[in-house]
Amino acid sequence: MNGWQREEPVAKDATDPDGDAPVKKSIAGRAAAAASGVVAVAALAAGIVMSPAPAPSARLNGVHQDLARAVALRQITDEQAAFLEAQIARSISSEEASPTSGAAGSRDVSTA
């Protein structure tokens, strides 16, 4: 070993009382951890997709709150907020009039 190189200490297994066994990272353990993460994400996504859409009034209340926050943070003006809220309200009311337009994530080109 050269004088400028250091020998790195070997990590010890926390379950080994003597501290003699090096830690072994198993590929199976990593795969199991990754798989459990994927399952959790899939369950969350399924819950979101299968959950009923919020009522139009709840959606408009959320939009109003978000725009009020943006105005308070001076990200947009009051006039811009009013314009956007009216535009989103029209979009939501048109979705309610034709429920198939919002299905499967399709967007109406005229409102884009």
Image: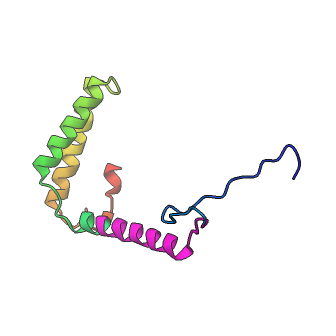
Residue 35 seen by the camera: yes
The picture places residue 16, in percent across and down from the top left corner, at: 52, 66
Is 58 placed above or below 38 here?
Answer: above
> What residue do we see at 85% from left, 43% from top?
4
| Of the pair 20 and 68, the residue shown nearer to us | 20
Residue 101 seen by the camera: no
Q: Is residue 7 magenta?
A: no
Is 3 placed above or below 37 here?
Answer: above
| Of the pair 50 and 81, the residue shown nearer to us | 50
The picture places residue 48, in percent across and down from the top left corner, at: 26, 63
> What residue do we see at 50% from left, 61% from top?
14
Is 46 placed above or below 111 here?
Answer: below
Q: Which residues are magenta?
A: 21-44
Looking at the image, residue 71 sits to the left or right of residue 29; the answer is left
Q: Which of the 4 image quadrants contains residue 78?
A: top left
The picture places residue 58, in percent across and down from the top left corner, at: 13, 48
> What residue do we see at 71% from left, 52% from top?
8
Looking at the image, residue 4 sits to the left or right of residue 100; the answer is right
Q: Main secondary structure of the magenta part?
A: helix
Is 50 placed above or below 88 here?
Answer: below
Residue closest to the far right: 2
| Of the pair 102 and 30, the residue shown nearer to us | 30
Looking at the image, residue 79 sits to the left or right of residue 7; the answer is left
Residue closest to the far front: 18
The picture places residue 42, in percent across and down from the top left corner, at: 35, 69
Coloring basis for residues: rainbow
| Of the pair 99 and 61, the residue shown nearer to us | 61
> What residue do we see at 44% from left, 69% from top?
33
